Amino acid sequence: MSYGFRRAVAADAPLIDGWLRLPHVAEWWGPEARFDPGKLADARQDVRIVTLAGREIGYMQDYDPHGWEGHPFAWLPPGARGVDQFIGPADMLGLGHGPRFIAQRLAALFAAGAPAIGTDPHPDNARAIAAYRKAGFAVAGPPADSPWGRYLPMVALRPGPAA
């Protein structure tokens, strides 16, 4: 199963905002979360719409954690990326799409040279933590707080050459 990751455009704002209002997304992203189309022009971020067989099924962004003063993943090496994602349509939940599309995107980021990738699910979000583990992340420290909220630091490292 192969997923597409098309670059988001300003016209996607209503789609992303609609997903952000769904109960399974709003529970973790916050009921007031709205998509800022200004993110699309921010060189620190790469915002994507995840597709499967032509259907838009999710949101995924990667970003430079060194681009924000005091970012929780600033300790990662230069070239590292951070990721955030969610599945939009509720009928796509629980089918294994999250771990699969996350792993596929991680492979692309590693192939592009990222030495490490961080993510920051809420410590109570067992579904996200399990998906990230299946995709190759490991817990990298205790739960903590940041300007973006409470999080569990998780990191995936670029695979080395086979021995």
Image: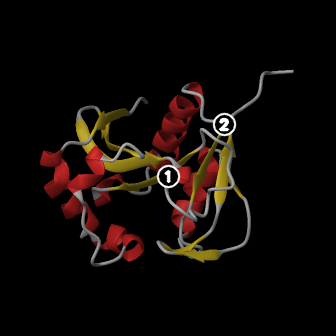
**Amino acid type for the residue under numbered disc 1:** Gly
Question: Residue 76: x percent and y percent?
Answer: 67, 50
Residue contact at pointers 2 and 1, CB within 8 angstroms:
no
- Name which residue type carries label 2: Pro
Residue lying furthest right: 163
Query: At x 51% / y 30%, what residue is drawn?
Result: 108
Quarter of the image with the C terminus is: top right
Assign the N terminus to one quadrant of the image: top left
Q: Dot 2: few (<14), some (14–19), or many (≥20) neighbours within 10 Å? A: some
The answer to whether residue 18 is above or below residue 15 is below
Image location (x, y in percent) of residue 30: 35, 76
Position of residue 140 in the picture relative to residue 29 (left or right): right
Q: Between tags 2 and 1, which lies in front?
A: 1
Q: In front here: 82 or 18?
A: 82
Circle 1 sits on which residue?
67
Residue 146 in the image, given as x and y percentages of width and height: 55, 74
Q: Earlier in the sequence, mark 2 or mark 1?
A: 1
Residue ID at (64%, 76%) = 144
